């Protein structure tokens, strides 16, 4: 899976979780950039990402993710 493919799939997940078809993800996108991205929605987002990519993200990685770029890196690492 390429980085671009991960971004395409993540964009769909983010748009569904936050009910916002206008979301455009970049490596530097953070919770500050998406209005409804709070700690509760972060949990929903992680669950949705895990379902989309069919693997669990270790809690240690979940709590250290700073932006979408790091999320993509983790997905690429776990998807090998």
Image (cartoon, rainbow, N blue to C red):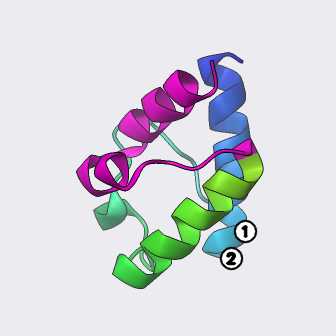
Q: Residues within 10 Å of mark 2 (few under 14, many from 20)?
A: few
Residue drawn at point x = 60 percent, y = 74 percent: 18
User: Does any portion of residue 21 appear in the rendered image?
Assistant: no
Give the quadrant of the C terminus: top right
Q: How many marks?
A: 2
Magenta-drawn stretch, dominant element (helix, strand or loop): helix
- In front of the other: 24 or 41: 41
Q: Secondary structure at mark 2?
A: loop
Picture coordinates of residue 23 (x, y %)? 59, 58
What are the residue bounds of the magenta stretch? 53-80
For mark 2, what is the residue? 19
Residue drawn at point x = 37 percent, y = 54 percent: 62
**Label drawn at residue 16:** 1
- In front of the other: 39 or 51: 51
Give the quadrant of the N terminus: top right
Picture coordinates of residue 71 (x, y %)? 44, 41
Residue drawn at point x = 64 percent, y = 46 percent: 10
Please, is residue 35 above or below residue 58 in the view? below
Q: Secondary structure at mark 1?
A: helix
- In front of the other: 5 or 46: 46
């Amino acid at each position: 899976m390429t980085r671009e493919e991960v971004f395409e799939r993540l964009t769909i997940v983010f748009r569904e979780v936050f009910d916002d078809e206008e979301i455009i993800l970049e490596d530097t996108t953070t919770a500050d950039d998406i209005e409804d991205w709070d700690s509760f929605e972060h949990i929903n987002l992680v669950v949705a990402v895990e379902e989309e990519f069919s693997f669990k993200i270790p809690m240690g990685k979940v709590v250290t993710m700073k932006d979408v770029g790091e999320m993509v890196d983790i997905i690429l690492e776990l998807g090998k």
